[in-house]
Image (cartoon, grey):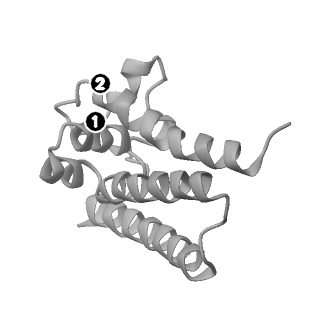
Amino acid sequence: MITFRGIAFALAVFPLAMLVIAGNLRPATAGLGTHQQLGLPPCTMRMMFGLRCPSCGMTTSWAHFARGQVYESFAANSGGGLLAIYSLVFAWLSARAGFSGRFPSFRTQKWLAISLLGIVAVTLVDWGIRMWG
């Protein structure tokens, strides 16, 4: 039977595993395309329309972040850098929930949701600047 603690620990491990995977990728010099090292296809939006999508550079951003190259992470995709930081906080809170057996406080959950919406906003603004700036 799956327990709350088991789910919480799995939620803690997932973002950390993603950072470990990203750390084993070589950041693309173009600032995007790093995800292709995982066997994924090129960005569909770039292939069809010749335009970056909002998440272009996200994997490159995480690869830089995992290497401690914070400036390069934000240069590749600002939302990606913020999401990498968010993932560390989320992993810590999930592990804490797993150890305590309790959900984070409502205030913490609210902060997490607002932060995630902020990251989406930053990602879209960053994309807009790259497209039309």
Compared to residue 65, the image places residue 100 above or below, namely below
| x and y percentages locating residue 127 in the rendered image | 35, 60
Rendered residue at 47%/43% (across/down): 15
Rendered residue at 22%/55% (across/down): 74
Question: Observer-nearest residue: 8 or 65?
Answer: 8
Residue 46 appears anywhere in the view: no
If you read the primary sequence from the N terminus, does the residue marked by circle 2 or circle 1 appear first? 2
- Res 132 quadrant in image: bottom left
Please give left or right for residue 81 compared with residue 104 in the image: left
Rendered residue at 48%/23% (across/down): 41
Secondary structure beneath label 2: loop
- Res 78 quadrant in image: bottom left
| x and y percentages locating residue 14 in the rendered image | 53, 39
Disc 1 residue crowd, few under 14, some 14–19, many 20+, Cα 10 Å: many
Please give left or right for residue 4 compared with residue 43 in the image: right
Disc 2 residue crowd, few under 14, some 14–19, many 20+, Cα 10 Å: many
Q: Which residue is mark 2?
A: 25
Q: Tell me the kind of residue under disc 2.
A: Leu
Rendered residue at 36%/45% (across/down): 58
Tell whether label 1 touches label 2 (CB within 8 Å): yes
Q: Tell me the kind of residue under disc 1.
A: Ala
| x and y percentages locating residue 105 in the rendered image | 60, 76
| x and y percentages locating residue 1 in the rendered image | 86, 36
Q: Which residue is mark 1?
A: 63
Secondary structure beneath label 1: helix
